[in-house]
Image: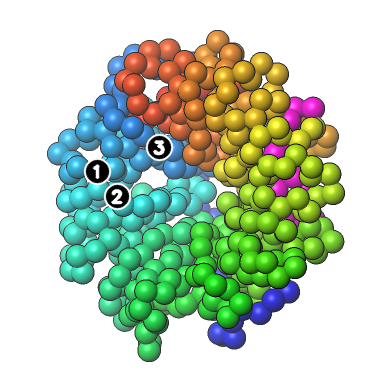
């Protein structure tokens, strides 16, 4: 365990509240392993009649845990009227087949500019945190730079969160990193110098947590002297208690490598996550990709060859670190359990840590995967383990274009992903990357980036 900060621990997060369940996707269900999984009425490999294709590129963001809502970015001009140039955030209601603009103002008006960064969602899809350069989303936005906002889809409100405890707006670049499932905690990184009392050095990036209940903003951790670069790629666990990020620290032999860190906001303790089960730090670059549940699992991509004993493929692999049990396992395995014959990237993990979504152009992960491009796969880590292809064509063959940017629903039954392929559903003729939803139980795919 390493100590990166002597700051006092933040106030203990509220107990995870019961959120009002979203409407069920459909009255018809299918029973899988004793649980019920909603099935969309449009769950077929075709665009339902009346759906209008996006006229520009779209990118997957998140899918709600009940499968009713899918969120995505799009530069299309035909998904909502009167939009400014740039990318915007949308919610697709898969039950009612309605597409809604999300990055709107506090009164529901269209934004004056597009998005300028990533978006993060709570598991139930109620809270959306995004970066926007629009100056009309809240009345107090007068700094003229990109800011971070949170949208409450239940109450239809928009709030500025990249502010100091006294409400002062950030005076430099900020970027969102995640939101707790109850919407209380928003984690972000910023180069601003005015977010905490006494300020921070100009041009140095720090990680902050905004407590929306108490109205406070605090620096989460300080970069240790042993790191030669600022913290990077922060994210927050579902309960808001833990954050993960990357630091450039000395690895085995003293050679600096990007190392994955987990920090407990309640106790103030910090530990290295990119380690083998025996505690050995990865001998090459590692990056955090996602938390599973309340911080029990951390999904990693690593070039290290020493995180598991049989990692001999010489490529980047995907790993899951069980923080409670102190166990690290590889997840980017082929259908027969062999190592991938190409690099893999970590994309997402289900709430219970069972399902891992990853991307790879490796040719040996599934039989018949002969397209030679990046595909999306899901690994069921239970028992002996099973790997399935997510980005599969309507006829069951390989996709004819690359796929990436995937998110899995909290229970692990639905995967939202981006693809340039034109053969995943019938009628895909717009010539741009689209967003698709794969139902792992029914083996069906629908396109969600439509009007």
Local crowd size for mark 2, using a 10 Å CA cut-off: few (<14), some (14–19), many (≥20): many
Local crowd size for mark 1, using a 10 Å CA cut-off: few (<14), some (14–19), many (≥20): some
Q: The residue tagged with tag 3: helix, strand or loop?
A: strand
Residue at screen point 58% across, 23% down: 372
Q: Nearer the viewer, residue 224 or 15?
A: 224
Q: Is residue 118 above or below residue 246?
A: above
Q: CA distance from mark 3 to mark 2?
A: 12 Å
Residue 280 image position (x, y, % from top left): 79, 63
Q: CA distance from mark 1 to mark 3?
A: 13 Å
Q: Is residue 428 above or below residue 163?
A: above
Dividing the picture into quadrants, the one containing residue 444 is top right
Residue at screen point 46% across, 32% down: 418
The residue tagged 2 is 115
Q: The residue tagged with tag 2: helix, strand or loop?
A: strand
Q: Which mark is residue 86?
A: 1
Which is more N-terminal, label 1 or label 2? Answer: 1
Q: Is residue 255 left or right of residue 376?
A: right
Q: Nearer the viewer, residue 450 or 100?
A: 450
Local crowd size for mark 3, using a 10 Å CA cut-off: few (<14), some (14–19), many (≥20): many
Q: Is residue 425 above or below residue 148?
A: above
Question: Which region is colored magenta?
Answer: 319-336
Residue 334 on the magenta span: yes
Residue at screen point 39% across, 61% down: 175
Which is more N-terminal, label 3 or label 1? Answer: 3
Placement of the C terminus among the 4 image quadrants: top left
Q: Taking the image as drawn, is residue 213 in sight?
A: no
Q: Is residue 424 left or right of residue 299?
A: left
Residue at screen point 66% across, 79% down: 3
Placement of the N terminus among the 4 image quadrants: bottom right
Q: Which mark is residue 59?
A: 3
């Amino acid at each position: 365990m390493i100590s990166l900060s002597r700051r006092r621990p933040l106030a203990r997060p509220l107990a995870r509240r019961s959120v009002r369940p979203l409407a069920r996707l459909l009255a018809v269900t299918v029973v899988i392993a004793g649980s019920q999984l909603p099935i969309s009425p449009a769950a077929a490999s075709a665009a339902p009649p009346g759906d209008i294709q996006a006229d520009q590129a779209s990118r997957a963001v998140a899918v709600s845990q009940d499968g009713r809502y899918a969120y995505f970015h799009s530069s299309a001009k035909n998904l909502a009227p009167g939009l400014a140039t740039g990318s915007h955030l949308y919610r697709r209601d898969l039950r009612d087949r309605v597409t809604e603009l999300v990055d709107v103002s506090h009164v529901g008006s269209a934004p004056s500019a597009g998005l300028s960064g990533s978006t993060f969602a709570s598991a139930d899809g109620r809270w959306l945190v995004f970066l926007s350069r629009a100056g009309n989303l809240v009345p107090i936005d007068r700094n003229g730079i990109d800011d971070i906002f949170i949208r409450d889809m239940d109450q239809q409100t928009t709030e500025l969160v990249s502010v100091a405890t006294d409400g002062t707006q950030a005076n430099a670049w900020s970027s969102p990193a995640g939101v707790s499932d109850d919407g209380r905690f928003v984690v972000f990184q910023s180069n601003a110098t005015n977010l905490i009392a006494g300020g921070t050095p100009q041009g140095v990036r720090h990680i902050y947590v905004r407590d929306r209940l108490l109205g406070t903003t605090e620096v989460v951790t300080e970069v240790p002297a042993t790191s030669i670069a600022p913290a990077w790629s922060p994210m927050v666990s579902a309960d808001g208690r833990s954050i993960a990020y990357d630091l450039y620290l000395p690895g085995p032999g003293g050679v600096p490598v990007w190392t994955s860190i987990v920090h407990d906001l309640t106790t103030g303790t910090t530990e290295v996550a990119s380690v083998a089960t025996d505690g050995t730090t990865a001998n090459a670059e590692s990056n955090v990709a996602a938390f599973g549940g309340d911080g029990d699992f951390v999904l990693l991509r690593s070039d290290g060859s020493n995180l598991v004993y049989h990692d001999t493929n010489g490529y980047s692999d995907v790993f899951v670190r069980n923080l409670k049990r102190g166990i690290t396992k590889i997840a980017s395995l082929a259908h027969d359990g062999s190592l991938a014959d190409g690099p893999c990237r970590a994309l997402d993990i289900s709430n219970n840590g069972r399902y891992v979504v990853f991307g790879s152009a490796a040719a040996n992960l599934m039989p018949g995967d002969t397209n030679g491009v990046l595909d999306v796969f899901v690994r069921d880590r239970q028992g002996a383990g099973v790997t399935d292809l997510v980005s599969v064509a309507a006829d069951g063959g390989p996709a004819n274009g690359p796929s990436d940017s995937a998110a899995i629903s909290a229970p692990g039954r639905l995967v939202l992903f981006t693809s340039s392929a034109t053969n995943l559903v019938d009628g895909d003729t717009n010539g741009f990357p689209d967003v698709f939803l794969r139902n792992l139980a029914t083996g069906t795919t629908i396109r969600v980036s439509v009007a």
